[in-house]
Amino acid sequence: MHLRLESFSTEVFFEIFEYLSSVDLFRGFFGLNGCLQRILNMYPLRLNLQQICRSDLDFLCHHIQPKQIISILLSEETMPDQVNIFLKYFPNFEHQFICLQSVNFIKTENCISQLPQCVSSLSFEKCLGQLWLENKIGDILIHQAKVLTHLNIQDERLIESINIELPLLKQLIIDSPCLIDRLHQIIQCLKASIISLKVSIRNQKDYYFPSKFEKLCQSLMYLKHLNITFASGIEISFHLLEQSLNHLPRLTHLTIEATGTRDLLDGVRWEEFLRRRGLIKFYFKFSLSLNLVWNQDQYSLLEPFRSSFWLKEKHWYVACYKNEWGNKCPLIFSVPYIVPHSIAYLNEIYPPLSTASSNVEKQLFYDTNINHLECYFPRLDSRQTYIFTKVKSLRLINRCSPFNLNMLTSTVDLGRVRILDISSVDHISTSELRDLLEHTPRLYHLTMRQQNQSLILPSHIRSLHLKRSLSQDSINFTNIDELRCELLHVVQLEIKVQTQELMIEIIERFDQLESIIFQWSGYLSEKYTSSEWFQQNTRRLHENNFTCRRGSERERGEPRQQIGCGYVPPKVFIYLSISKHDPKQPALDKDRSSLHSLLTIFQRGWNNLFHRN
């Protein structure tokens, strides 16, 4: 009996599509046959354009149907001018995307002014900095005011400046810390029955802060989900929280980070409060104010959190850290929710002391998602019996001893790592590097020193950051071609340069690159970072098939480096995004290798399913 692919139901295909990126989805299924094409056209697509290369963007824009898009994420972190490129494909955006519900802008220098009235969810992350852009965002909010239900903004000033009502708003997220007075004014101005709120309260010397926070809670009587962070300079007491939260009768989910008095760390009082209120979820991170002294040890501090209420009824676990001030300022937090997603696995004690039993400890501290892990080798830790199984980004630090792959694999499951930084590893040979990369089949981005080991990077590594600068003296026409062969599969490259000539050579010789970030230390005239200059001085970019942008250390969140009493010259970052392929043609040869390509994409979907769970 032969089972045809088309015999699967539409629901089965929709389930498969959930675990594929938009690019894989369309490159794998577009034009395969009429039946699958109809299913693909019906699929409600969430279009994520973050970290996408230019050719993939062009390909998607040529093949998606606007009416099937229900959400869009646009980002110019690595692709300059992505919003305008997208709008060139869809100039009548407002009337084309008739089923669009959600739009997310991340670090963009432009926005889509006219959105369909069906868009009820908006997010603007890291989009501030220019007055005209802030005004444009304000105009968008005014245009969507009557339909908006979900809003994520970077700064409360955006809402405060336009002074409008959002009567249907249910969820509000404000990324930057805001003053309690401004937040209260905004809540009153919106005239909305907000159900979910995520906010940070900025530090301020205000004697009336307790009463102001209580009034804020009184204005949020419909709130069910509260995620609030108080700046460390604000001293919070359990009494203040209890008194204020009692004004939120519908509250079911509470996440809170605060510094304060001793009663804030009292597990008995929290148990009494939680029993009385019947919260479904409670996550917290509490520390003692610096001016207070704590004489209890960690075991005594955690003891109230070992009751049957915490461990058996709720299965809520609590951990404790001694911070750099010792017992004077202990830190307690709920796990796994507040488990640090960025861990410096150097000399700190890990895992921290907790109320979890040994069999639960592995799940909470090692099988949880770790966004970034820094590992120092050799690290002798006789207590470690488990492996980190879900590390996304890994940085290795090894300055004085030989590289030891066996020690690394006994610490981290390398099969899950997507981003790897080995620029701080000394004494690693070509064969050792080759073995390391063979153990990282899902690796996408690699950061290393200058590639000079005659090693062709494997095909799954598509993004590379070379940290050591290239000077005109250390490179010539011969070895730049050798370097190109070693980086044959890399499409995104970040590299330090010291001359304009070298920038031109990399653009011309590395014709497989679709995204380039040049780092330049010191002064660089803006004319050398303009689109016109690149178009006039390179054959590859002569047809204006690219976009470019100039950036700074501050924009990337990098600290200014200091030498003695002065600073090193500031860095300039030049971002280039180049259109390489004919966007109308799928990269896969359907006639020659359709089965192999489709199986490869299915394998990616299976891996995504496995690694999500």
Image (cartoon, grey):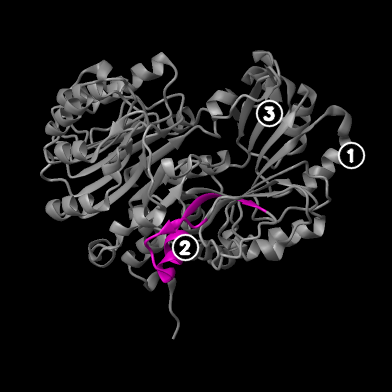
Q: Nearer the viewer, residue 107 or 490?
A: 107
- In the picture, residue 11 is in which quadrant? bottom left
Amino acid type indicated by mark 2: Asp
Q: Considering only order in the chain, which callout, 3 or 1, is on the residue closer to the N terminus?
A: 1
Q: Residue at x 61, y 55 (%)?
A: 443
Q: Nearer the viewer, residue 467 or 363?
A: 363
Indicate the secondary structure of the residue bearing disc 2.
loop
Mark 3: few, some, or many residues within 10 Å (few <14, many ≥20)? many
Q: Nearer the viewer, residue 247 or 64?
A: 247
- Looking at the image, can residue 119 be seen? no
- In the picture, residue 227 is in which quadrant? top left
361 shown above or below 53: below
Q: Residue at x 82, y 29 (%)?
A: 471
Q: Residue at x 44, y 45 (%)?
A: 327
Instruction: Residue 17 in the image: state x and y as whole percent.
Output: 41, 59
Instruction: Residue 508 in the image: state x and y as whole percent.
Output: 75, 33
Q: Nearer the viewer, mark 1 or mark 3?
A: 3
What residue would you read off at disc 3? 519
Chain part drawn in magenta: 350-376
Q: Which mark is residue 367?
A: 2
The CA span between labels 1 and 2 is: 47 Å
The CA span between labels 3 and 2 is: 37 Å
What residue would you read off at disc 1? 478
